[in-house]
């Protein structure tokens, strides 16, 4: 009997052919794998959010195996002694069990929470990159809107998740949420009654938030993320202007193999950072907050960082109560303005900014090349203004902790926040605008006169001048066109625009020896100086 | 004739004077008697109405309290006044605050105060244990007041579960869930409980120092006080943080937000710089 020859090298090819015969995927897959992505570090910020979302799904599924979304009262009898015998909700008891009795439960819970904070932080940082480089302009306005919605849906996901442990902190957060809903004129009490099924806290809110947190909101997030990524594929990624890069092409790496491998590696890094934070940094010690009871509100009860700006706006709001003289007087509580109106305005501005800017500039063309922030001073200024506004509100949300730890009067913190909220954003706009103009000015100077060499030459009449290395051919001093990209400003940055010596943390190659001109022999080191002595040796 | 008559009537008669108009000598003598009587009355009234002198004299101080008074007159009198009656705008009266108050304020270094400000801060202790006891004896003998029970370990038979519940209801509003303290209005604050000893916590509950309310034995019984101290000392201080090497100060979500940007985002931006640089 003849042994059949088995050709190992042909296995992948044969397998691929077999798959393609049946499913016909070779042509679309080739298109996909050959897709080119431009390479720049700032294009990876959105991936941090995507990868932390994957970690959120993985850890979240683990947590659902042990979490019990019920508000029935139980007596805790687990292994955490300081709460043993305390009556609490089943939700809180199962959270304690996850933390103390489920193997690996505490690190999973902490990774889930850190991944949630990282998801929101990465979304914000990614949004800032997109905003400051003008990547939201036509044709990508839709993707900007989807990205903004992702932030606000993530906000809801975070808040519902924050409420699930049913500890003192999450109950306090729910109490504030119910107060915010109640403050809405006319419909407030109906909204609250519908959400809580009656009075706060009721007996069903945890189950409702659970299904929103594990099914509805993640489903919405996955749908939005899919459309977001699909649009990046069909509209192609933006790129920085540079040699060979135009509005009509994409210069970069193919999706397969290099880009995919790098992204896989980056996912591992994100996962590793979240796991390290989950293991090293304690987050939300629910066992210290105790079960939620309406009469227990701890000092330093704050929402997570992305909700803190609402807490801050509430703390800064003066107690202006508006009474409308209808019947016995209809009261609009001051809480309504900073917690319902303000976020409403922020959502509207963030969603429609691309259209507002296009209308303002009368610019309805398609843009696939990015802009440097300095080249569009008004947009950069507006962005810094918005960031300043948000940061002041966020800091005010933690103003009691700041006041206590830095020994500042809490009243002074509140007034500083109120005044700062009005004064600092316009100031930030002005300062940013001037800095942008200054940077533009310097770029133009270098293009006109060349790079400073650091060589000072003395002229025959005694004057000193600095020699500039002209960037253009010929005698220099001709106008060079600004290409919208980095202008070299140091001698060792001339040429390919990359760093002269490659390597990120340490040089991976030696600098090339400078070629020696035959007319100028290499400079010899100065001979060692000798001390002039008397010639005698001292004992 | 008149002088003869006078001489005949003798000294007594002259003192008694004539029935009609009093003589010069009698008038002078009467004025002197009235002056002495008025002085006696004024002096007596002063003695009765000025209790300091009487308090100083009447119940004699024990020897420890006398030593305490000597210390008081050197270190405390400038703000709390002579005999601890207080000075308007500088320091309150100490009559009736009790030994517990002295033990807390002086034992934690808050008194003597460094300067007049919103609230006295914990400092290195100025007096020795014996001196604090003497000051406490003096203030206690001035007007009574709450006293901390004897012993350094006041939470030996405390129940941390009950203590935790009581702590969260009564203490966490100001001292926070972690015992780390929190801000009050206008520069006042609830201090961190980490450096506090059993006796200081007990004394603080009894005496209600600075902005803290008094939790007397009718509100929180001595057994419940022991439970609360057990929760603070065992659970909040000694049990550590099972969630990791760093507890981020247990300041709640504010430091967690700082950590995600300073650690998470910074690390990952460096990672993306590194990965994007490898092309």
Image (cartoon, coloured by chain):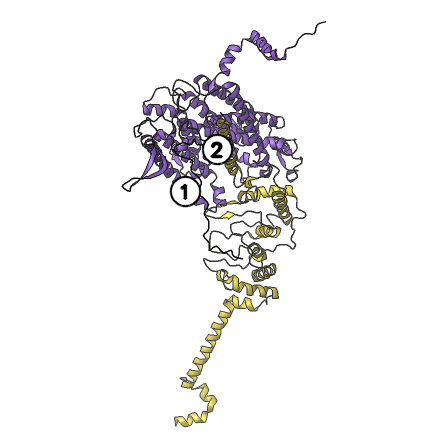
Chain colours: A purple, B yellow
Q: Which numbered disc flags the more N-terminal residue, 2 or 1?
A: 2
Rendered position, A431 above or below A24: below
Q: Does the magenta stretch include residue A512?
A: yes
Which residue is depicted at the point 56% across and 64% down? B69
Which quadrant is home to the N terminus of chain A?
top right
Numbered marks: total: 2
Residue wearing tag 1: A416
Determine which quarter of the picture holds residue B177.
Answer: top right
- Is any part of residue B80 visible from this angle? yes
Q: Which subunit holds the residue at mark 2?
A: A
Q: Label 2 neighbourhood size at 10 Å, few (<14), some (14-19), many (20+)? A: some
Q: Nearer the viewer, residue B141 or A274?
A: A274
Is label 1 in a helix, a strand or a loop? helix
Q: Nearer the viewer, residue A364 or B144?
A: A364
Does the CB distance between marks 2 and 1 fall below 8 Å? no
What is the chief secondary structure element of the magenta stretch?
loop
Over which residues does the magenta segment extend? Answer: A510-535
Rendered position, A312 above or below A483: below
Q: How far is disc 2 from disc 1 in space, using C-alphas? A: 20 Å
Residue wearing tag 2: A307
Which quadrant is home to the C terminus of chain A?
bottom right
Relative to A188, is B229 on the left or the right?
A: right
């Amino acid at each position: 009997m003849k042994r059949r020859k088995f050709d190992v090298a042909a296995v992948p090819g044969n397998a691929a052919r077999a798959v393609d015969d049946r499913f016909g995927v070779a042509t679309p897959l080739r298109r996909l794998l050959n897709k080119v992505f431009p390479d720049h570090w700032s294009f990876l910020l959105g991936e941090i959010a995507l990868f932390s979302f994957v970690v959120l799904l993985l850890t979240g599924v683990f947590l659902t195996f042990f979490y019990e979304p019920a508000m029935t009262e139980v007596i805790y009898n687990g292994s955490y002694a300081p709460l043993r015998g305390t009556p609490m909700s089943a939700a809180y008891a199962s959270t304690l069990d996850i933390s103390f009795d489920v193997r690996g439960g505490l690190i999973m819970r902490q990774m889930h929470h850190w991944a949630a904070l990282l998801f929101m932080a990465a979304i914000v940082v990614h949004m800032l990159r997109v905003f400051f480089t003008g990547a939201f302009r036509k044709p990508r306005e839709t993707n900007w809107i989807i990205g903004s919605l992702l932030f606000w849906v993530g906000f809801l996901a975070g808040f519902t998740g924050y409420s699930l442990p049913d500890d003192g902190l999450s109950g306090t957060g729910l109490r504030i949420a119910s107060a915010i809903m109640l403050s809405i004129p006319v419909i407030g009490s109906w909204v609250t009654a519908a959400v809580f099924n009656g009075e706060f806290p009721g007996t069903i809110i945890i189950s409702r938030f659970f299904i929103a947190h594990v099914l509805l909101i993640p489903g919405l997030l996955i749908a939005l993320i899919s459309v977001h990524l699909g649009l990046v594929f069909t509209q192609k990624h933006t790129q920085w202007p540079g040699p060979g890069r135009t509005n009509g092409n994409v210069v970069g790496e193919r999706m397969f193999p290099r880009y995919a491998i790098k992204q896989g590696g980056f996912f591992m890094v994100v996962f590793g950072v979240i796991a390290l934070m989950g293991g090293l940094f304690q987050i939300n010690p629910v066992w210290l907050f105790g079960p939620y009871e309406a009469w227990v509100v701890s000092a330093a009860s704050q929402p997570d960082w992305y909700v803190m700006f609402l807490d801050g706006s509430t703390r800064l709001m003066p107690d202006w109560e508006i009474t409308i003289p209808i019947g016995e007087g209809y009261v609009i509580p001051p809480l309504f303005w900073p917690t319902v109106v303000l976020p409403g305005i922020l959502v509207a501005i963030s969603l429609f900014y691309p259209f507002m800017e296009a209308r303002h500039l009368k610019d309805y063309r398609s843009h696939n090349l990015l802009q440097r922030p300095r080249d569009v001073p008004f947009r950069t200024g507006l962005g810094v203004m918005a960031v300043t506004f948000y940061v002041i509100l966020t800091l005010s949300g933690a103003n009691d902790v700041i006041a206590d730890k830095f020994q500042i009067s809490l009243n002074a913190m509140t007034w500083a926040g109120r005044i700062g909220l009005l004064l600092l954003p316009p100031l930030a706009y002005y300062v940013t605008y001037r800095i942008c103009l200054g940077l533009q000015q310097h770029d133009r100077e270098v293009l006109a006169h060349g790079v400073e060499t650091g060589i000072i030459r003395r002229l025959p009449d005694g004057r000193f001048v600095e020699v500039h290395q002209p960037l253009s051919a010929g005698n220099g001093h001709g106008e060079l066109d600004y290409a919208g990209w980095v202008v070299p400003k140091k001698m060792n940055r001339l040429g390919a625009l990359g760093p002269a010596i490659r390597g990120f943390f340490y040089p991976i190659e030696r600098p090339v020896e400078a070629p020696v001109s035959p007319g100028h022999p290499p400079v010899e080191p100065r001979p060692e100086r000798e001390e002039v002595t008397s010639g005698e040796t001292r004992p | 004739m008149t002088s003869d008559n006078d001489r005949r009537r003798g000294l007594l008669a002259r003192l008694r004077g004539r029935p009609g108009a009093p003589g010069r000598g009698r008038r002078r003598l009467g004025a002197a008697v009235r002056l002495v009587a008025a002085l006696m009355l004024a002096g007596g009234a002063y003695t009765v109405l000025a209790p300091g002198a009487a308090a100083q004299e009447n119940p004699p101080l024990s020897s420890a309290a006398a030593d305490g008074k000597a210390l008081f007159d050197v270190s405390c009198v400038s703000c709390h006044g002579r005999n601890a009656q207080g000075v308007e705008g500088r320091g309150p009266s100490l009559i009736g605050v009790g030994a517990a108050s002295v033990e807390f304020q002086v034992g934690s270094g808050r008194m003597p105060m460094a300067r007049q400000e919103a609230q006295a801060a914990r400092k290195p202790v100025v007096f020795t244990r014996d001196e604090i006891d003497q000051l406490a004896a003096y203030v206690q003998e001035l007007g009574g007041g709450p006293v901390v029970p004897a012993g350094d370990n006041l939470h030996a038979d405390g129940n941390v579960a009950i203590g935790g519940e009581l702590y969260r209801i009564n203490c966490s509003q100001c001292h926070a869930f972690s015992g780390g303290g929190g801000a009050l209005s206008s520069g006042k604050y609830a201090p961190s409980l980490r450096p506090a000893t059993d006796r200081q916590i007990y004394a603080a509950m009894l005496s209600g120092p600075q902005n803290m309310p008094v939790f007397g034995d009718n509100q929180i019984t001595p057994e419940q006080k022991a439970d609360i101290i057990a929760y603070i000392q065992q659970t909040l201080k000694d049990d550590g943080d099972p969630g990791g090497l760093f507890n981020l100060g247990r300041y709640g979500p504010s430091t967690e937000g700082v950590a995600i940007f300073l650690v998470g985002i910074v690390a990952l931006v460096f990672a993306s710089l590194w990965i994007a640089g490898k092309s």
